Image (spheres, grey):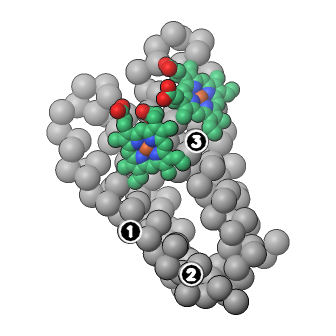
Amino acid sequence: MQAFAQRWIYAALIYFCVAVTLGVVMGASGDHSLFPVHAHLNLLGWVSLTLIGVIYHFFPQAGASRIATVQFWVHNVALVVMMGALTASLKGNPSMGPVLGISSSLMLLTILAFTGNVMVRRA
Ligand code: HEM
Ligand code: HEM
């Protein structure tokens, strides 16, 4: 597997460790209030990044493109900001709406960029 695909997998592994640690802490403490953070760290972090890395492995022209590099960084920054804001919001901070709106819209944009990238550079 080439480096442009591997970076997705390495980032995914970090989210996997963090998300499962949070899952174990929630289970042990009985406080499940952060379960949406746990769920989305797993699903937008571990699962989505792994799938994107594997898909780029099979679509190397798309994976090696500049748009994939931009998409990688925007996805990661948006996810970290989104999870931080979601944690603050779930812990009672009422002012996180705009941050969640902007970060989740950025996430949507990266997913649309990914979809377009794979469709256009299919070879
Ligand atoms: C040792 C590993 C894990 C532990 C201890 C754990 C623990 C938990 C706990 C305590 C909850 C809250 C349940 C509730 O209050 O309803 C939860 C929810 C959730 N977990 Fe995990 N989890 C683990 C791994 C994973 C993994 C690997 C994934 C996905 C790839 C995942 C996806 C989810 C999802 C989607 C929810 C939300 C379910 C719902 O909507 O009720 N978890 N987990
Ligand atoms: C920009 C991306 C995303 C946004 C803004 C988003 C937003 C949301 C929202 C607002 C909820 C309802 C939460 C609640 O009622 O407490 C939710 C729940 C859920 N989403 Fe997402 N989601 C995104 C991506 C994904 C992806 C990619 C997956 C799966 C691969 C996913 C899986 C789930 C699951 C399993 C639930 C139920 C568990 C929970 O409430 O945390 N989401 N999501």
Asked if the residue at label 2 sits under 8 Å from ligand 2, the reply is no
Q: Is 101 placed above or below 94 here? A: below
Q: Is residue 44 left or right of residue 51?
A: left
Q: Amino acid at mark 2?
A: Met
Residue 83 seen anywhere in this rendered image of the structure: no
> Label 2 near label 3: C-beta < 8 Å?
no
Q: Is 8 placed above or below 119 here? A: above
Residue occupied by mark 3: 42
Q: Which quadrant of the render holds ligand 1?
A: top right
The residue under the point 47% across, 66% down is: 111
Q: Amino acid at mark 3?
A: Asn
Asked if the residue at label 3 sits under 8 Å from ligand 1, the reply is yes
Mark before the other along the chain sequence, 3 or 1: 3
Quadrant location of residue 121? bottom right
Q: Which mark is residue 109?
A: 1
> Residue 117: x, y in percent?
54, 81
Mark before the other along the chain sequence, 1 or 2: 1
